Each structure stands twice: as C-alpha cells, then as structure tokens.
Image: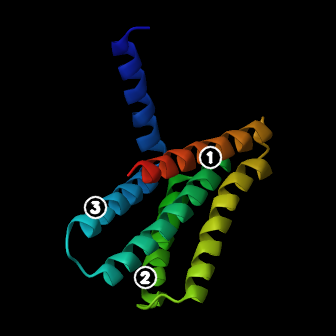
Amino acid sequence: MNIISIINQRFEQVKKSIIRFPESIILSTSIAVLLIIVAENNVDEDLYRNIIMSLIFGFLITLNTILFTERTDKKIGIRLGIDGCIVLLIGLMYWIMPLNMTASFMTMYLSLCVSLFVGYTLILYVMKREDYGFYLVRIVLNLLVTLLYTFGNYSVA
C-alpha cells in the first residue's frame, strides 16, 4: 500500500465516524475548545468548569443513545427526539451543578460518568455482539496505553 491510499482510507474512516456520531464529535470538539480557552486565557474557571462537566455528561449520554438506537434500528425521528432530550439534560445538569464543588458532588458525578461508560460497553453485550470478550480486552488495553502515555508525558515534563 502506498501512502496516498492509506491517507484516503483514514479520511474515509473519519467520514464514517462523522456520519455515525455527529453529536458526540460536536460535543467532544466543544469540550476541547473550551479546555484550550480555559488553559490559555484568564477566565472564570468555575463557569467554564460547569459548562465542560455538563458537556462531558452530554457526550457520554449521546454515545449511549446513538449506540442503542443504532443497534435497535430506531428511526431518525426518534433519534432527533432523543437528541432534544439530551440537550435538555445538558442544560439541567448545568443548572443543578453547584458553584463550589464538594467532594460528595464530585463523587456522584464521577460515579455517574463511570456508570455511563460501563453502560456503553454493556449495550453491546445485551445486543449480542460477537467477540464481546475481545472487545472488552481491546478497550482495557487502549485505556492502559493512554494512561501510560499520559503518565509518561507528565514524568518527562
């Protein structure tokens, strides 16, 4: 394979991902932009922290709902209705977040995020995905590689 065909293949994969997960890609891009704004500018960190945490919550919910509607062959109208509910949930999450984060709220938030991650993997199990065990091993290995790169970068810096 030459380099041009590899690049074209990667662009096709990105195109398929954008078509499959448009909401999640928009939310993750928004999160990245907001994190850059907070890191580079002198802004009100409490406001941006609440917005970012709400968007992360919405990102996890969109991943779960997209995968569920995809696996159950729901119509596009139902998916748009679910997207509207997700927007309301993101707004609700923003408004119920306290300005001063307490340890108990952060524990509840993190447990909610972890449960949404676990739910994302369990949807595939419930929908009878082939090679589910290998899929879980691949997810765990990717997480470990990411953690190694992260801690490796912090130890060098």
Q: Pick whichever of labels 1 and 3 is earlier in the sequence.
A: 3
Discs 1/3, front: 1
Residue beneath disc 2:
94
- Between 109 and 70, which is closer to the camera in this rendering? 109
Residue beneath disc 3:
36
Label 3 to label 2: alpha-carbon separation? 20 Å
Residue 135: % across, % down: 71, 40
Q: Residues within 10 Å of mark 3 (few under 14, many from 20)?
A: few
Residue 19: % across, % down: 43, 42
Q: Where is 145 relative to 82, above or below?
A: above
Residue 3: % across, % down: 36, 13
Q: Where is 23 relative to 50, above or below?
A: above
- Between 45 and 47, which is closer to the camera in this rendering? 45
Residue at (69%, 52%) from the top-left corner? 121
Q: Pick whichever of labels 3 and 2 is earlier in the sequence.
A: 3
Q: Quadrant of residue 24?
A: bottom left
Q: Quadrant of the N terminus?
A: top left
**Is residue 150 toward the left or the right of residue 68 in the image?**
left
Dot 3: what SS? helix
Q: Mark 1 belongs to which amino acid?
A: Leu
Q: Residues within 10 Å of mark 2 (few under 14, many from 20)?
A: some
Q: Residues within 10 Å of mark 1 (few under 14, many from 20)?
A: few
Residue beneath disc 1:
144
Residue 126: % across, % down: 79, 52
**How many numbered circles are shown?**
3
- Mark 1 in CB contact with mark 2 (< 8 angstroms): no
Label 1 to label 3: alpha-carbon separation? 25 Å
Q: Mark 2 belongs to which amino acid?
A: Tyr
Discs 3/2, front: 3
Q: Where is 38 relative to 138, above or below?
A: below
